[in-house]
Amino acid sequence: MFDVFAKYLQSKADFTPAEIEQIRVASVLKTLRKRHYLLQAGDIWTYNAFVTSGCLRTYSVDAKGAEHIISFAVENWWTGDQESLTSGQPSRYTIEAVEDAEVLLIKKDDFDQLRRDIPTLDGVINTIFHRSFIAAQSRIHSAISYSAEEKYREFLQKYPGFALRIPQHMIASYLGVTTETLSRIRRHLT
Amino acid sequence: MFDVFAKYLQSKADFTPAEIEQIRVASVLKTLRKRHYLLQAGDIWTYNAFVTSGCLRTYSVDAKGAEHIISFAVENWWTGDQESLTSGQPSRYTIEAVEDAEVLLIKKDDFDQLRRDIPTLDGVINTIFHRSFIAAQSRIHSAISYSAEEKYREFLQKYPGFALRIPQHMIASYLGVTTETLSRIRRHLT
């Protein structure tokens, strides 16, 4: 499974074989069955995590027991809770496998050391955070300005494969609309 | 006004006097009267911008003419459109002074060169993008999971000075709630 990660890294920048090997040694494979947890709310998140197969969701549960999904991650995406990782505080999120999944974990200290040792990796990670910020800003824009239908259309366009893999009630939760609203929109779209 | 920026930079990391001078030479001061534009939607944004005084808002206008504010920026904050800056595509946002404001502008090419020349600056900027990503994720979480009242309470707590400086209808737009809903919440809070 490390091959998926190695291929991803090589697609982003030129790494030497020795650098890839150094990253491999620090990576630990975690296999998750569907509905199993990678992180439970209240625990401190201490890894950097790269998904090599499957699909995960990051969500919070509010006082009324409703789930709110802030992100999905499929193969070749990163997951985890940067807030908890950076602050050292317990996470407010749970990360759970939507499908059977495989994730490569690198402990925070090891990852920080790799970034210091391998400037190419540091550059790739900095670029990812920059792009992630831009993507998050764009999602804020959609969340506050788009209608439920516009949000769903954008979701289909941005993530064409997701609608087939992810249950509708999870997509509704991600978009911040009710399941009933999403069902109505889907009927109108067909 | 550059002193505000120099002080900000020194608070983040140790810059040499020569480095601060190099940054100063690349910075251009832009003074904005209230309601004047820093960026108009449809134009390409080509600067990095640091606010030294006043307050600005970044917003889009939808097909019905409604404004949606995705961010405010006051003194010691950065502003601008990273999406347009990175992609080279026209911006979907307008940035306008909410109060008379002063902004330091550094052209993209000059800024990129400064980041290459001054590793300390590069480190500060990378940290800012990382933190901005975490803050944006947190705002997505609020946007999809909080009630209107919870959103307003969080806004008051995170930005205690803003409610006094920024008109209520702009705060409502930022929170993605109607002006009427915000007025009702404010009456209940007092």
Image (spheres, coloured by chain):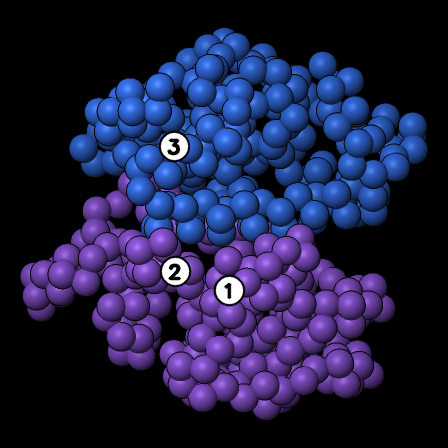
Chain colours: A blue, B purple
Label drawn at residue B61: 2
Residue beneath the point at 52% across and 10% down? A100
Residue type of the residue flagged with mark 2: Val
- Mark 1 neighbour class, 10 Å CA radius: few under 14, some 14 to 19, many 20 or more: some
Nearer-N-terminus badge (1/2): 1
Nearer to us in this view, A157 or B30: A157
Name the residue type under label 1: Ala
User: Residue A19 is drawn in which quadrant?
Assistant: top right
Output the chain of dot 3: A
| Side (left or right) of B132 relative to A67 | right
- Closer to the camera, A86 or A129? A129
- Whether residues under marks 1 and 2 lie with C-beta atoms below 8 angstroms apart, the answer is yes
**Subunit under mark 2:** B
Residue assigned mark 3? A152
Instruction: Tell me if mark 3 has few (under 14), some (14-19) or many (20+) residues whose alpha carbon lies within 10 angstroms of its own.
Output: many
In the rendered view, tell whether residue B89 sits above or below residue A176.
Answer: below
Spatial CA span between label 1 and label 3: 24 Å
Label 1 secondary element: loop
Chain ID at mark 1: B
What is the number of the mark on residue B41? 1
Q: Position of residue A18 (x, y in %)?
A: 91, 30
Residue A147 at x, y percent in the picture: 31, 42
Q: Is disc 2 in contact with disc 3, using a CB cutoff of under 8 Å?
A: no
* Structural distance between the alpha carbons of marks 2 and 3: 20 Å
In the rendered image of this protein, does residue B62 appear above or below residue A5? below
Q: The residue tagged with tag 3: helix, strand or loop?
A: helix
Q: Disc 1 or disc 3, which is closer to the eye?
A: 1
Q: Position of residue A90 (x, y in %)?
A: 42, 40
Res B72 quadrant in image: bottom left
